[in-house]
């Protein structure tokens, strides 16, 4: 037991790990968008930080008490059954698919500034597609290779973001900051709403914080602390870095930049330093994309293994890489990249981010709603935890609203299409239930349907052969006879 304890992380180590995992490429284009609202966007950071901590705490509890695998799909299954599990997996997969395009666009934006070239909107689209395919091909080596690369490249964003949060204040000009408070004279709630979705984008991935619960000492106590502490730590760094930048670079310049961190460091020091930061950001973006492209392939593979997605996503090589699924996903991403081309790079980035946020919030809401059942099934119900999950849900609805009419419309269409797709696979999960209840209803009414009886007998025989024991089907036992 002593050896096992020595190999576990402390709460401080897990808190740091949680914050670092969240600080990927999500932050690097945000100063441009936030500058378009003004420095009043700091209020959006505060709202999002509180909402994200509520979500992170609830996810920590889900991860601690669940007995099902599959992440948010497993959480949703407690309350919404297989249909809810499918929708959580489907919308999460779609969200990652879109989000990775936004990451690739971030890399292209910084790269064009780094190379001092000005690309047309079509050229940006083409280079985005090329970046996606390069990341996909590099993932053919499997998770071990991807993990090594990503663990190095993540420092390309952490060093500049932490650096400007600490030393940037020496160049901070209060008048520059105050002049940028509300440059477009927006109403208070309009300004708050316009930047909520973009700030939530920086926190996406918080749901994975509970994945390390088995690797920490006293997980019931320390995992929620680490989730809250890691989210709060990331929030503080995000708020400091974006706001100190707003007091260094004039608002008009920042709002039009394709590489805001590079611009800030060039203003603070020299153009050469700005170039170095741009190079680090390009490296970080690509490393983040590399990891997330592998992650989305694994998400699709898990869903395929569950019977939700086509079997082609389950095929893996000797290196454990689902190459066929990766290629299929990248083809879809290439088409989406062409469909979302905009005259301004940051406009394309914003469109993709808002759509990614909308689709990512669906499994968040399903997971929050399932937490009551998850807690009670584990014998650990807490009214306070349920209330925190409710606050997280309310924030999620506000984030949906703030994403805008177009993103809500397209996100809704994508979600509704998911229900149609589930209809084609639901036979694997729901047919026996329907046969059983038809049989019970026929018994109750005295109706005799020989075809229905034969169908029930055939499926009962199949169930018996799979379970290697003869017993009558009971819907309550479905999850245990899966």
Image: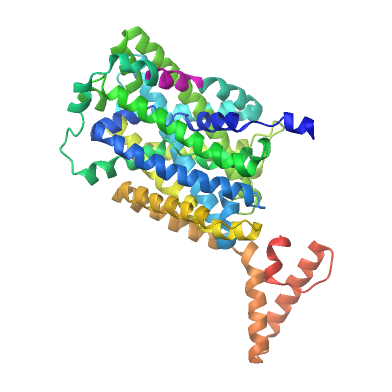
Quadrant for residue 317, please give it: top right
Looking at the image, can residue 325 be seen?
Answer: no
Tell me residue 460's x, y (percent). Answer: 76, 72
Question: Seen in the image, is 446 located left or right of residue 331?
Answer: right
Looking at the image, can residue 114 be seen?
Answer: yes
Image quarter of the C terminus: bottom right
Tell me residue 87's x, y (percent). Answer: 52, 55
Q: Residue furthest bottom?
A: 446
Question: Seen in the image, is 136 located left or right of residue 396?
Answer: right
Q: Is residue 333 above or below residue 68?
A: above
Residue range corresponding to the magenta coloring = 155-164
In the depicted view, which residue is nearer to us: 478 or 185? 185
Residue found 56% across the figure and 61% down from its top: 79
Tell me residue 193's x, y (percent). Answer: 28, 45
Q: Is residue 349 above or below residue 462?
A: above
Image quarter of the N terminus: top right
Q: Residue furthest right?
A: 469
Q: Is residue 474 above or below residue 254?
A: below
Asked whether residue 161 is drawn in magenta, I would say yes
In the depicted view, which residue is nearer to us: 24 or 11? 11
In the depicted view, which residue is nearer to us: 187 or 194? 187
- Name the main secondary structure of what is drawn in magenta: helix
Residue found 71% across the figure and 67% down from its top: 477
Asked whether residue 246 is drawn in magenta, I would say no
Residue found 56% across the figure and 45% down from its top: 60
């Amino acid at each position: 037991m002593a050896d096992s304890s020595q190999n576990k992380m402390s709460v401080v180590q897990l808190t740091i790990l949680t914050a670092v995992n969240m600080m990927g490429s999500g932050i690097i284009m945000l100063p441009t968008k936030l500058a378009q609202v003004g420095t009043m966007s700091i209020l959006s950071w505060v709202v999002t930080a509180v909402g994200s901590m509520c979500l992170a705490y609830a996810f920590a509890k889900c991860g601690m008490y669940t007995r099902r695998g599959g992440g948010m799909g497993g959480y949703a299954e407690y309350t919404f059954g297989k249909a809810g599990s499918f929708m959580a997996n489907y919308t999460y997969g779609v969200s990652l698919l879109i989000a990775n395009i936004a990451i690739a666009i971030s890399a292209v934006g910084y790269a064009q500034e780094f190379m001092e070239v000005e690309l047309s909107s079509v050229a940006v689209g083409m280079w985005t597609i090329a970046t996606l395919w390069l990341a996909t091909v590099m993932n053919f080596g499997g998770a071990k290779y991807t993990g090594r690369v990503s663990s190095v490249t993540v420092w390309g964003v952490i060093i500049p973001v932490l650096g400007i949060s600490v030393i940037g204040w020496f160049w901070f000009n209060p008048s520059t900051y105050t002049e940028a408070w509300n440059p477009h004279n927006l109403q208070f709630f309009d300004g708050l709403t316009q930047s909520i979705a973009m700030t939530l984008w920086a926190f996406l991935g918080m749901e994975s914080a509970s994945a390390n619960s088995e690797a920490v000492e006293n997980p019931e106590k320390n995992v929620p602390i680490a989730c809250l502490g890691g989210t709060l730590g990331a929030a503080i760094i995000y708020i400091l870095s974006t706001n100190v930048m707003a007091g260094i670079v004039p608002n008009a310049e920042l709002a039009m930049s394709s590489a805001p961190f590079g611009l800030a460091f060039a203003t603070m020091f020299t153009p050469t330093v700005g170039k170095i930061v741009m190079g680090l950001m390009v490296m970080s973006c690509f490393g983040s994309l590399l990891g997330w492209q592998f992650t989305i392939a694994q998400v699709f593979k898990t869903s395929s293994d569950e019977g939700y997605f086509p079997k082609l996503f389950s095929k893996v090589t000797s290196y454990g890489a689902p190459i066929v699924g990766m290629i299929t996903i990248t083809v879809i991403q290439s088409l989406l990249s062409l469909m979302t081309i905009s005259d301004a790079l940051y406009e394309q980035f914003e469109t993709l981010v808002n759509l990614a946020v909308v689709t990512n919030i669906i499994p968040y809401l399903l997971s929050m709603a399932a937490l009551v059942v998850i807690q009670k099934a584990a014998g650990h119900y807490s009214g306070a935890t349920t209330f925190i999950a409710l606050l997280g849900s309310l924030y999620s609805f506000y984030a949906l609203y703030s994403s805008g009419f177009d993103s809500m419309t397209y996100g809704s269409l994508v979600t509704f299409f998911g229900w149609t797709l589930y209809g084609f696979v639901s036979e694997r999960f729901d047919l026996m239930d329907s046969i059983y209840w038809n049989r019970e209803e026929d018994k109750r009414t005295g109706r005799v349907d020989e075809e229905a009886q034969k169908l029930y007998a055939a499926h009962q025989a199949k169930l018996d052969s799979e379970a290697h024991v003869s017993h009558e089907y009971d819907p309550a036992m479905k999850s245990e006879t899966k």
